[in-house]
Image: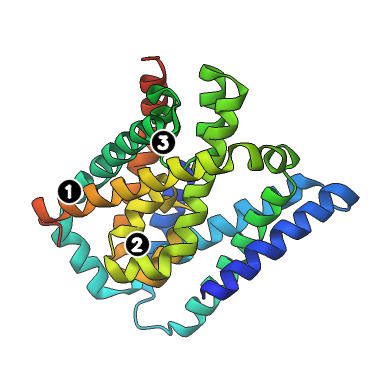
Amino acid sequence: MFHLMVVLIAGIALGYFLRGKSKARISKAIFASIMLLIFFLGFTLGSNSELLRSLPIFGWNALLIALISMLLSAAFALLVKRLVKIE
Amino acid sequence: MIKYILIALATGALAGYANSNLGVFDNSAAGFLFDASLVFLVFMMGLSFGKDRDALEKMKKKGPRILALPLAIAFGSILGGAISGLILGIRMVETATVSAGFGWYTLAGPLTGQMFGAEMGALGFIANLLRELITIVTMAATAKIDRYMPIAFGGATTMDTTLPLMVHYCGNEMAVTAFASGFALSIMAPFTITAIGSLG
């Protein structure tokens, strides 16, 4: 987990020195690797036979838990954003 | 974008399913490629953020106040988990433990399994996995409502898997906000899961 922080900071530092250089290539590379990332996310899920077995049993309950917690997270986040004046 | 995301996810799942039955590739190879593309992506996120003058200025203005955000997200998550337990007729402590994973399914699954048995472990894994998938699939819409909404939806995942999409839909200046929020929630998750779980 911490290696991602190191990688992010290294990226920011390099980006800082590369200011003014073209941006088009970066966004193409990002798009391609997002697709790769999501493909491999799907791949690891599709090859997880335990997950595929338990999905029909626990799927609906899990969906409800996920949705309600996400919506309340969003509600409190938007409230706090206004209270703390983040923007 | 969303069309390509769904295609990538579906073909990945089919390929993974076929591969686990046919056994062409070692599954750890897919895991390695996943990690490698993640590291590359986070680096590129940093790069495009560092290049963006306005993004750095906007970030400086926000300062430490953005840390209130992950706290609100955590509170909403746990409360939501408790409420869904009430609706489903499952003990509220157990569903709140599940939702205290904030989308980190590889952590929440095993931990809830340890505390409440294999069934709750599976529920914890799937509920948090769905949080990540729903965040990805709905991002084009949620980012339009409010740029902080996908960050709240994503929970702990906004420091890695959903970060690149977040930047795509919400702009460069949200990269560090999203990362900081996801990072704070990732640090909190092991504690919130075990703390709430130990109540039951």
Parent chain of label 2: B
Q: Quadrant of the C terminus of chain B?
A: top left
The answer as to whether the residues below labels 1 and 3 share one chain is yes
Residue B50: in sight, yes or no?
no
Q: Position of residue A48 (x, y in %)?
A: 72, 43
Judge whether B106 appears above or below B35 on screen: above
Disc 2 is placed on an element classified as: helix
Nearer the camera: disc 3 or disc 2: 3
What is the crowding at mark 2: few (fewer than 14 residues within 10 Å), some, or many (at least 20)? Answer: many
Closer to us: A63 or B99: A63
Q: Which residue is mark 3?
A: B99
Closer to us: A14 or B170: B170
Q: Position of residue B134 (x, y in %)?
A: 48, 56
Sequence order check, earlier mark of 1 and 3: 1
Instruction: Examine the image and state in which quarter residue B63 appears.
Output: bottom left
Q: Which residue is mark 1?
A: B64
Q: Amino acid at mark 1?
A: Pro
Nearer the camera: disc 1 or disc 3: 3
Q: Which mark is residue B175?
A: 2
Q: Amino acid at mark 3?
A: Ser
Answer yes or no: do the residues labelled 2 and 1 have beta carbons within 8 Å?
no
Judge whether B120 appears above or below B176 on screen: above
Disc 1 is placed on an element classified as: helix
Closer to us: B164 or B42: B164
What is the crowding at mark 3: few (fewer than 14 residues within 10 Å), some, or many (at least 20)? Answer: many
Q: Residue at x 40, y 83 (%)?
A: A21
Q: Position of residue B186 (x, y in %)?
A: 40, 39
Residue B178: in sight, yes or no?
yes
Q: Residue at x 47, y 84 (%)?
A: A24
Q: Which mark is residue B78?
A: none
